[in-house]
Image (tube, grey):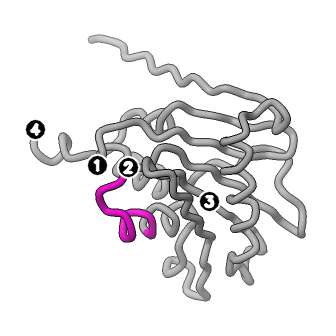
């Protein structure tokens, strides 16, 4: 029997300590929360991706009375970016969330389904995607999507 130890490095810092590029991406994600359709949860999530060509694409969560039919902000954003720029890698993704008109104090982390989609986008272009999780009190920065889902499902799982 062997043991597998997994370690995730997360940089933790304040908005003031962020680089100008990260601040810009976070601000785009915060603005994107305003276009969320969340009448059931009142949890408004925005995401912004920075593409390798310098474009920033944003998206927001879109709920539906039939809950499984809605879609998270991260997936809306990544799918839109991939559809508009299918040959351009995502370099970074920022996520922000607000509830009752206030941004969350702690960083908002993607759900399991979104983690899988982020990992697929990272694998698609064979390069890391920085993940930035915004909270009013602190920001979490992960060097890649695989850090969110270290034992993820990918094409290697299908074709061993």
Q: Residue at coordinates 67% horizontally, 44% vertically from top-left?
A: 133
The quarter of the picture where the N terminus appears is top left
Q: Residue at coordinates 73% horizontally, 28% vertically from top-left?
A: 12
Residue 13, how many percent across, how many down?
Answer: 77, 29
Q: What is the spatial separation of the Cα atoms under label 3 and label 1, in whole angstroms?
A: 19 Å
Q: What is the spatial separation of the Cα atoms under label 2 and label 3, in whole angstroms?
A: 16 Å
The local secondary structure at tag 2 comes to: loop
Q: What is the spatial separation of the Cα atoms under label 4 and label 2, in whole angstroms?
A: 26 Å
The residue wearing badge 4 is: 160
| Residue 42's disc number | none
Residue 125, how many percent across, how many down?
Answer: 30, 45
Q: Looking at the image, is 6 positioned above or below residue 66?
A: above
Residue 33, how many percent across, how many down?
Answer: 73, 68
Tell whether label 1 touches label 2 (CB within 8 Å): yes
- Of the two numbered discs 2 and 3 on the same chain, state the one appearing first in sequence: 3
Q: Residue at coordinates 89% horizontally, 69% vertically from top-left?
A: 100
Residue found at the far bottom of this picture: 65
- Of the two numbered discs 4 and 1 on the same chain, state the one appearing first in sequence: 1
Most foreground residue, 23 or 115: 23
Q: What is the spatial separation of the Cα atoms under label 3 and label 4, in whole angstroms?
A: 34 Å
Most foreground residue, 18 or 150: 18
Question: Between tags 4 and 2, which lies in front?
Answer: 2
Q: Quadrant of residue 18?
A: top right
Residue 122, how many percent across, how many down?
Answer: 37, 44
Q: What is the spatial separation of the Cα atoms under label 2 and label 1, in whole angstroms?
A: 8 Å
The residue wearing badge 1 is: 124
Q: Give the range drawn in magenta.
A: 80-89
> So how many labels did they put on this image?
4
Q: Residue at coordinates 54% horizontally, 54% vertically from top-left?
A: 49
The residue wearing badge 2 is: 89
């Amino acid at each position: 029997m062997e043991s597998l130890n997994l370690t995730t490095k997360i940089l933790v810092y304040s908005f003031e300590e962020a680089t100008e590029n990260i601040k810009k991406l976070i601000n785009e994600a915060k603005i994107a929360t305003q276009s969320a359709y969340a009448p059931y949860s009142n949890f408004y999530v925005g995401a912004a991706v920075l593409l390798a060509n310098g474009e920033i694409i944003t998206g927001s969560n879109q709920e539906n009375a039939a809950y499984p039919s809605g879609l998270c902000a991260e997936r809306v954003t990544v799918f839109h970016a991939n559809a508009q720029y299918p040959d351009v890698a995502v370099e970074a993704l920022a996520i922000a969330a607000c509830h009752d008109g206030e941004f969350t104090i702690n960083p908002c982390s993607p759900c399991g389904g979104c983690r899988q989609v982020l990992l697929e986008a990272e694998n698609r272009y064979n390069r890391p995607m920085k993940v930035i999780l915004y909270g009013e009190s602190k920001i979490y920065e992960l060097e890649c999507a695989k850090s969110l889902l270290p034992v993820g499902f990918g094409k290697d799982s299908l074709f061993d």
